[in-house]
Amino acid sequence: MADVFVSRRIFDQAIEQVEDAGHTVRCNDTSRILPTDELIDRTRDAEGLICLLNDPIDADVLDACPNLKVVSNVAVGYDNVDVEAATERDVLVTNTPGVLTETTADLTFALLMAAARRIPEADVYSRADRYDGWELMQPHMGVDVYGKTLGIWGMGRIGQAVARRGYHGFDMDIIYNSREPKPDAEAELDAEYVEFDTLLERSEFLSIHTPLTPETEATFDAETFERMNDEAILVNAARGPIVDEDDLAAALKAGELRGAAIDTFEDEPAVNQQLAEIEEFVVLAPHIGSASRETRLEMAEMAAANMVAGLEGSVPPNLINEDAL
């Protein structure tokens, strides 16, 4: 029997899953992000840690919790975990890939549509009882999505799922840039692999789907925005720090791109106030890409299954660092 700490509230079903395997589970049963010193204090004697994507698990945390065997991250991304440090200490690290692909793609396309058709602006306008009747030149005219060029940066699971929605649902031309060409996606979606500069120049909608790494951080900055199609709408439902938000706000104000739809912020949970001041063709959401009840429950249950397997000495289904075995 092992001691498992859960850093934030999760579904009871996932907790019961770990308990049914014979382990003791302690929880921070709130939405409060624990400061590092408190996280260490509550994890110090634990053999398992179930954490969320905004819990930084670095070498200091790992060193302060020498009994840890498994870190189970409830997210597909794991940039919050120092995987190299965990591997050096024989700590297994797992994530929850695949399960959130379609849900996140749904949200990404919803953001794209909402920005293009200015739905949040129109909603505020209607609730304020400012609608005086239909007219040809209405104040919230947007832009068409159907038949436009959709650029994907990062043609992984989610990127391809977004591209399918654009291609099959809206007859969009798909161009993409990724670490390597994706022949299957090209065949299915008539997608064209292009260089990054070409992606910036041709995309009328550009959706980001790369992981956050030192190489991708702040890729979208002032210089990048200058090279983008000035009719483009940028969508980011990946990781906030990939976009320099001050530069994005400046580019929007300067007309270097049409709009933006943002689900993840550079300094979460802080919302960039320069972006928040811009209403036209800008949509901001609080990191809800995978936030359907069904998907979040499945993510938690997958994290629990990873934890149970790791504690039992089996290979977890979604192990990131096989060298730690």
Image (cartoon, rainbow, N blue to C red):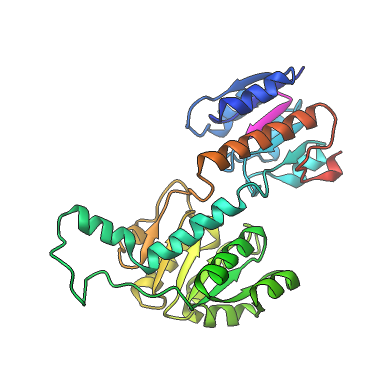
Residue drawn at the location 42% of the way across and 52% of the way down: 285
Residue 31 % position (x, y) = 47, 32
Residue 45 versus residue 284 in the image, above or below: above
Q: Is residue 38 above or below residue 75?
A: above
Quadrant, the C terminus: top right
Q: Main secondary structure of the magenta part?
A: strand
**Splitting the image into 4 quarters, where does residue 322 fall?**
top right
In the image, 245 versus 157, the foreground residue is: 157
Asked if 2 appears above or below 88 in the picture, the reply is: above
| Relative image position of residue 225 (x, y in whole percent) | 48, 75
- Give the camera-side residue of 79 and 214: 79
Figure check: 212 above or below 44: below
- Where does the magenta region start and end? 46-50
Can residue 42 be seen in the rendering of this structure? yes
Q: Position of residue 125 (x, y in %)?
A: 21, 59
Q: Does any portion of residue 220 appear in the rendered image? A: no
State the image quarter where residue 38 is shown: top right
Query: Position of 212 compared to 259: left or right?
Result: right
Q: Tell me, yes or no, whether the highlighted magenta stretch contains residue 307.
A: no
- Quadrant in which the N terminus appears: top right
- Give how far across and how far down residue 69 sits, in percent: 77, 30
**Which residue is more in the foreground, 83 or 199?**
199
* Residue at the extreme left of the image, as rendered: 132
